[in-house]
């Protein structure tokens, strides 16, 4: 089944927390990356089937915008990412998250 990567960048921690929560609840996806971006911005990335990532991303963006003071700064979906992208960027499935993989 074709996999996709979805990334949401928010302003403020409550917004990224709401986005991450809603994404894993809204679709059969696995959270693969979270970190601080810069200047109070945070980024969260998910992986899963393309159709599920699209659904989860919409739910995550809505939840982030609905959180108090939440702002989605950026978002993007990469359907069928090439292997070299997965090797270089921190969005591949790792041993730490393997038990949570959907």
Image (cartoon, rainbow, N blue to C red):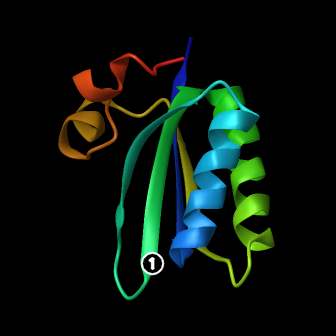
- Location of residue 15 with respect to 18 vertically, above or below: below
Q: Residue at 25% across / 47% down in the picture? A: 89
Element type where label 1 sits in the image: strand
Residue closest to the far bottom: 39
Q: How many marks?
A: 1
Residue 94 seen by the camera:
no
Q: Nearer the viewer, residue 58 or 19?
A: 19
- Location of residue 95 with respect to 79 vertically, above or below: above
Q: Position of residue 31 (x, y in %)?
A: 48, 38
Residue 15 seen by the camera:
yes
Residue closest to the far top: 1
- Location of residue 97 with respect to 70 vertically, above or below: above
Q: Residue at 56% across / 56% down in the picture? A: 76
Q: Position of residue 74 (x, y in %)?
A: 56, 70
Residue closest to the far left: 88
- Which corner quadrant holds the N terminus? top right
Q: Position of residue 96 (x, y in %)?
A: 27, 27
Crowding around mark 1 (Cα neighbors within 10 Å: few <14, some 14 to 19, many 20+) is some
Q: Which residue is mark 1?
A: 41
Q: Picture quarter containing residue 37?
A: bottom left
Q: Residue at 52% across / 24% down in the picture? A: 3
Q: Position of residue 97 (x, y in %)?
A: 35, 27
Q: In the figure, is residue 49 to the left or right of 64?
A: left
Q: Nearer the viewer, residue 73 or 96?
A: 96
Q: Residue at 44% across / 69% down in the picture? A: 42
Q: In the figure, is residue 23 to the left or right of 1?
A: right
Q: Nearer the viewer, residue 31 or 83?
A: 31
- Which corner quadrant holds the C terminus? top right
């Amino acid at each position: 089944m074709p996999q996709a990567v979805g990334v949401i960048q928010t302003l403020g921690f409550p917004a990224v927390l709401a986005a991450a929560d809603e994404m894993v609840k809204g679709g059969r996806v696995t959270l693969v990356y979270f970190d601080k971006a810069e200047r109070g911005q945070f980024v969260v990335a998910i992986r899963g089937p393309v159709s599920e990532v699209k659904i989860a991303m919409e739910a995550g963006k809505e939840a982030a915008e609905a959180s108090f003071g939440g702002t989605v700064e950026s978002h993007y979906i990469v359907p069928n990412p090439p292997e070299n992208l997965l090797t270089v960027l921190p969005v591949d499935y790792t041993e730490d998250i393997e038990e949570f993989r959907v």
